[in-house]
C-alpha cells in the first residue's frame, strides 16, 4: 500500500486518520477524541471548526481564489495588511505575505540584506542568531537556526552565521540574578558585533519566547530592551521571529510587546491563520520600505502563493475572530492558570525540572535529577516517551527535543487553543499528569531515576 507519510516512530504504528475537529478537540476516524494541547504545531489558536472562518473561505473562493500578486491586489489582502499594521507596534506598517514561517524568516533575512545594499552598504550582509533558536526548515532559515537535531544532517550546506547564547534562566550560572543574567546574555550580542565588525552585520534575529528548540523559554526582563539598544548603537536591524509567539499566543498581540520593544522586521505564521490555510508574513517598518522604494523599488523575494486573496480572506477572518472574542486577553488570563497548574506538576513530580511560559505558550523540562538539574541523554528519549503516552491517552503535546547544543533539550510545549476554558485546562492537566507519572514509573523500574 502506498502511503503519504511515514510510520509514527514513537508509537511504532501508523498515524490515526483525522476525522474532524471542534474547539479544542480533534477526533480520529476510529472515534477517539484528543485534546489539542499544543494547537497542532502551536498553530490552531482559535480552535477547530470555526464556522465564521469556513464561511469567509467559501465566500472568497466563490469570488476569486487566486490572483497573482504581480497582477492584482485585493480587498482581502489590503484589509489584512491594514489590520496587521493596526496591531503591530511602531511603524511596522508593511507586510509581505508568504505561506510558511520558514518563508517568512527567509524573506526577512533577504529584506535585511537588501536594505543595506540599497543604503550603499553591501558588506552588511551577515545575520547573527542564537544557538537556542528555530527559524525554519529551509536552508536560509535553517542557517539562522540553532536547533541542533534539525541542522545536524545538513551542516555542510548551511551558511556559517555567527551565533550567540540565548537566555535560558533555568540553567543560568548559580547565584546570578535574573537582572544581571539578562544583561550578560544581551551583551554577548555587542561582543559578537565588535568581533565581526558592525560593517559586516545586517541583522540580529531572535524569537521573543524560544519555542521548538527550548520549550517556551521566556527571557528575563531587560534582555530585549538591551538588545534593542545594541542594535541601534551598531546599526544592526532587529528581526523578531514571532512565527510562534505572534497574534496573541503569549497574551499580548506580539511577544515583543511584553517588553515594549519595536523590531525593524517581524515575522508571523502559525496563529496568523490558525491553521485554516497556509499563511505567513514578514512585516517591515516605514524606513525599510522607503529605502527600498527610493532604491530599486522591488523587494527581491516572493513565492507563487504570496498574497493570494484566498489565504488573505481566511487569515483576516481569523484575526477578526481573535478580536471579537477577546482571545488575546483570554490567552493572558487562562495562560496564567495553565502555568500555575503546570507549576503544581513541577512541584509534585520528580521528573519535571521546570514549568515555564508566557500566556498560552508554556513548557515543561524533564530532568534526571531535580536538585542538580542533570538532563537526560537525548538517546533516553524521555520527552518523546511522555508525548507518546499522552497521545495514547488522548492528549496532544508538542516536542521541544534536541534543540540545545548538548546541554539539555528534553522538553515539551503545552499550548492549547486560546479559547480553552478553565475546566478544559483541568482535563488537560489530569491527562498530562497521568502520562508523566506512567513514564516516571517506567524509568524508576529500570533504575534510571531515583
Ligand atoms: N520560526 C519559528 C519561531 C517557528 O516556531 C517555526 C516553526 O515551528 C518557524 C519559524 C518555521 O515555520 P514553518 O514550519 O511554518 O515553516
Image (cartoon, rainbow, N blue to C red):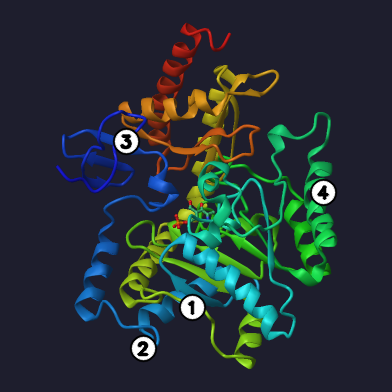
Instruction: Name the element at disc 2.
Output: loop
| Residue receiving disc 4 | 183
Q: Nearer the viewer, mark 4 or mark 3?
A: 3
The mark total stands at 4
Instruction: Name the element at disc 1.
Output: helix
| Residue receiving disc 1 | 82
Instruction: Give the image quarter of residue 100.
Output: bottom left
Q: Nearer the viewer, mark 3 or mark 1?
A: 3
| Residue receiving disc 3 | 8
Say whether disc 4 or disc 3 marks the residue closer to the N-terminus.
Answer: 3
Q: Is residue 414 left or right of residue 15?
A: right
- Taking the spot 48% from the left edge, 29% from the top edge, the residue there is 383
User: Residue 120 at x, y = what percent?
Assistant: 73, 85
Say whether disc 3 or disc 2 marks the residue closer to the N-terminus.
Answer: 3
Q: How far is mark 3 from mark 2, CA to CA? A: 42 Å
| Residue receiving disc 2 | 72
Q: Nearer the viewer, mark 1 or mark 4?
A: 4
Amino acid at each position: 500500500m502506498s502511503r503519504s507519510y511515514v510510520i509514527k516512530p514513537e508509537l511504532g504504528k501508523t498515524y490515526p486518520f483525522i476525522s474532524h475537529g471542534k474547539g479544542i478537540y480533534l477526533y480520529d476516524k476510529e472515534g477517539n477524541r484528543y485534546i489539542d494541547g499544543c494547537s497542532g504545531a502551536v498553530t490552531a489558536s482559535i480552535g477547530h471548526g470555526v464556522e465564521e472562518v469556513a464561511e469567509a473561505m467559501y465566500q472568497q473562493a466563490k469570488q476569486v481564489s487566486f490572483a497573482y500578486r504581480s497582477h492584482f491586489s485585493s480587498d482581502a489582502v489590503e484589509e489584512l495588511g491594514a489590520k496587521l499594521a493596526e496591531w503591530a507596534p511602531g511603524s511596522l506598517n508593511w507586510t509581505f505575505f508568504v505561506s510558511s514561517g520558514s518563508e517568512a524568516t527567509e524573506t526577512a533575512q533577504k529584506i535585511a540584506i537588501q536594505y543595506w545594499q540599497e543604503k550603499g552598504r553591501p558588506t552588511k550582509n551577515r545575520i547573527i542568531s542564537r544557538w537556542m533558536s528555530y527559524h525554519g526548515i529551509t536552508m536560509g532559515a535553517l542557517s539562522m537556526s540553532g536547533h541542533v537535531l534539525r541542522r545536524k544532517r545538513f551542516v555542510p550546506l548551511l551558511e556559517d552565521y555567527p551565533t550567540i547564547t540565548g537566555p535560558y534562566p533555568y540553567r543560568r550560572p548559580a547565584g546570578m540574578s535574573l537582572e544581571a543574567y539578562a544583561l550578560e546574555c544581551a551583551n554577548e550580542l555587542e561582543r559578537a558585533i565588535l568581533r565581526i565588525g558592525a560593517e559586516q552585520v545586517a541583522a540580529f534575529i531572535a524569537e521573543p519566547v524560544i519555542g521548538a528548540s527550548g520549550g517556551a523559554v521566556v527571557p528575563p526582563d531587560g534582555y530585549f530592551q538591551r538588545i534593542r539598544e545594541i542594535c541601534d548603537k551598531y546599526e544592526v536591524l532587529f528581526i523578531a521571529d514571532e512565527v510562534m509567539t505572534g497574534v496573541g499566543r503569549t497574551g499580548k498581540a506580539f511577544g515583543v510587546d511584553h517588553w515594549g520593544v519595536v523590531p525593524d522586521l517581524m515575522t508571523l505564521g502559525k496563529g496568523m491563520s490558525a491553521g485554516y490555510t497556509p499563511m505567513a508574513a514578514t512585516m517591515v517598518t516605514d524606513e525599510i520600505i522607503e529605502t527600498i522604494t527610493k532604491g530599486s523599488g522591488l523587494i527581491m523575494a516572493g513565492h507563487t502563493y504570496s498574497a493570494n486573496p484566498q489565504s488573505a480572506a481566511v487569515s483576516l477572518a481569523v484575526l477578526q475572530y481573535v478580536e471579537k472574542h477577546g482571545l488575546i486577553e483570554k490567552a493572558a488570563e487562562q495562560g496564567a492558570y495553565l502555568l500555575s497548574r503546570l507549576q503544581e506538576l513541577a512541584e509534585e513530580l520528580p521528573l519535571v525540572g521546570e514549568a515555564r511560559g508566557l500566556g498560552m505558550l508554556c513548557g515543561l523540562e524533564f530532568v534526571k535529577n531535580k536538585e542538580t538539574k542533570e538532563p537526560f541523554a537525548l538517546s533516553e528519549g524521555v520527552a518523546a516517551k511522555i508525548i507518546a503516552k499522552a497521545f495514547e491517552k488522548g492528549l496532544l503535546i508538542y516536542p521541544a527535543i534536541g534543540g540545545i547544543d548538548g546541554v539539555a533539550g528534553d522538553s515539551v510545549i503545552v499550548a492549547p487553543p486560546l479559547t480553552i476554558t478553565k475546566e478544559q485546562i483541568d482535563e488537560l492537566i489530569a491527562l498530562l499528569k497521568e502520562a508523566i507519572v506512567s513514564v516516571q514509573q517506567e524509568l524508576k523500574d529500570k533504575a534510571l531515576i531515583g
